[in-house]
Each structure stands twice: as C-alpha cells, then as structure tokens.
Image (tube, rainbow, N blue to C red):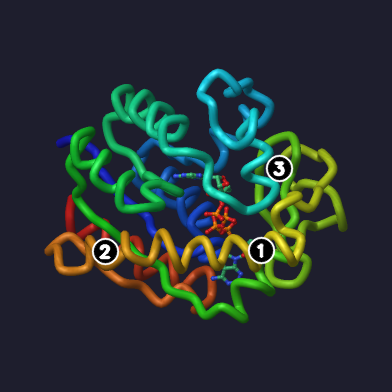
Amino acid sequence: MSQPKILLLGPPGAGKGTQSSNLVDAFGVEHVTTGDALRSNKDMDISDLGLEYETPGEYMDRGELVPDEVVNAIVEQALTSADGFVLDGYPRNLDQAEELESMTDLDVIVSLSVSEAELVDRLTGRRVCEECGENYHVEFDQPAEEGVCDECGSELIQREDDQEDAVRNRLDVFAQNTEPVIEYYADRDAFVEIDGEQSLDAVWADLEAAVEDTV
Ligand code: AP5
C-alpha cells in the first residue's frame, strides 16, 4: 500500500512542525516543509527574478511570504521524489493552492486551529536547535538542560521571525493570505479540523486517528 499524502494547514505556531515529526515517525512519510527548505537557502541570490528583495531571508525575517516562483519550485521538486509525505507550510495563498493541484493529489487535509493569544505565546517562547532543527518552548516543552538541545547537544536559539513584531506580521499575513486557503479546502471529504490548542498528546491522538482513517 502506498504511504499517505497529508497536508497540514494552520497558522504560524499551530504545531505543524511539532506534529509533522510525529507523522514522520508513525507513518514513515517524508516531511516536506517550505519553512525549513527556505531557512536552509536564506541567502540564496534571487536578484535575477527582479523581486522586491534579493534573498529569501529578507522576506522571512520580516514575516512576509517569499514569492511564489521561488516556493513553488522547491515544493514541486520535493514532491516528485516523495512517496508519502506530510506537506507543512504550503500552500499559503490561493495561487499556491492551485499550483499544488497540478502537482499531486491529497489523502487527508488537516487544519490545526489555535487562538491568536496562544499563538503569540507559543512563537515568542519557542527555541530551536540551530544544528538539527528540533523545537522547544521555554514553558511548554523544555529541554533537560536550559538552552541545550536534547537531541544533539547544540545551542538553542530564538528565530529572528519569532520576535514579537515579526510574529504579529506573520499572523496578519496568515489572516489575509492563508485563511482563504483553509476555506478553499474546507468542503472536501478529505478535510479534517483539529483543535490545536489541546495538549501536544491530545492533538497527536486526533491527528493520528484522522490519518489512520485514510490508510
Ligand atoms: P514556517 O517555518 O513554515 O513558519 P510558520 O508556518 O510560521 O510555522 P512555524 O514553524 O512558526 O509554526 P508551526 O506551526 O510549525 O509550530 P511549531 O510546531 O513550531 O515559515 C517561515 C517563513 O518562511 C514564513 O514566514 C515565510 O516567510 C516563509 N515561507 C514558508 N513557506 C512559505 C510559502 N509556502 N510561501 C511563501 N513563503 C513561505 O510550534 C510552535 C511552538 O509551540 C513550539 O515551541 C512548540 O513546542 C509549541 N507547541 C506546539 N504545539 C503545542 C501544544 N499543543 N501545546 C503547547 N505548545 C505547543
């Protein structure tokens, strides 16, 4: 049987990255994440595209969307080499959603919903491992030793776009661009909404059940 094709939608800080790791472990799917792919290519020279800024990082640090032509190419390449996948961070606007239709079909579309106040707390308190990318939170998900990654022992940092001003901008960008994407999928049979404000384990239980229904 082929592996599931999962789309994970939700605002910044909803837990998409956290729960994607669980999906990778439980279902053996590939994690296709535009955020991580772009962070690895933050300084890529895109000046020949004639856009507002010359690197993806200049958009990201401000909490703006990186232009579609850059992001679509990354996703298309990643999906062609994946059997099953969890797609996290894409599509973020209706043009990207239409582009995705031409790349693949989807078995389950999950939207994680979380209130704005909780999102601000989660994002401003998030710490990430610069080396392996593992996520932590200063209150909800602490490492054994403060400031040190449990997985690889490297230093934990705060992402530039997790500063409060950038967080507020990301939430505005989400409301304007990505909420319409959730509406676009909402009446499909494959669509499931999960309360992302529950505990990590409770969110995972709902998500695992939703994906198991499709395999
Ligand atoms: P990206 O990296 O995709 O960021 P995001 O969507 O803003 O999502 P986050 O990674 O911030 O949050 P998450 O939902 O993964 O939450 P997490 O699990 O970490 O994108 C970054 C930037 O790249 C964008 O702003 C844009 O510039 C660019 N970009 C990316 N994709 C693009 C696209 N398609 N088009 C254009 N530009 C694009 O959890 C957050 C915190 O909460 C953690 O600390 C975690 O421990 C904690 N937490 C999680 N779940 C719970 C829970 N249930 N209870 C308590 N705490 C929890």
- Front-most of 76 and 21? 76
Disc 3 or disc 2, which is closer to the eye?
2
Type of the residue with mark 2: Ala
Residue receiving disc 2: 210
Residue 40 location, quadrant: top right
Residue 138: percent from the left, percent from the top? 78, 66
Mark 2 lies on a secondary structure that is helix
Q: Residue at x 24, y 57 (%)?
A: 212
User: Marks 2 and 3: in contact by CB < 8 Å?
Assistant: no
| Neighbourhood count class around disc 1 (C-alpha, 10 Å): few under 14, some 14–19, many 20 upward | many
Q: CA distance from mark 3 to mark 2?
A: 28 Å
Residue receiving disc 1: 167
Type of the residue with mark 1: Val
Specify whether 75 is left or right of 107.
Answer: right
Q: Residue at x 70, y 53 (%)?
A: 161
Q: CA distance from mark 2 to mark 1?
A: 29 Å
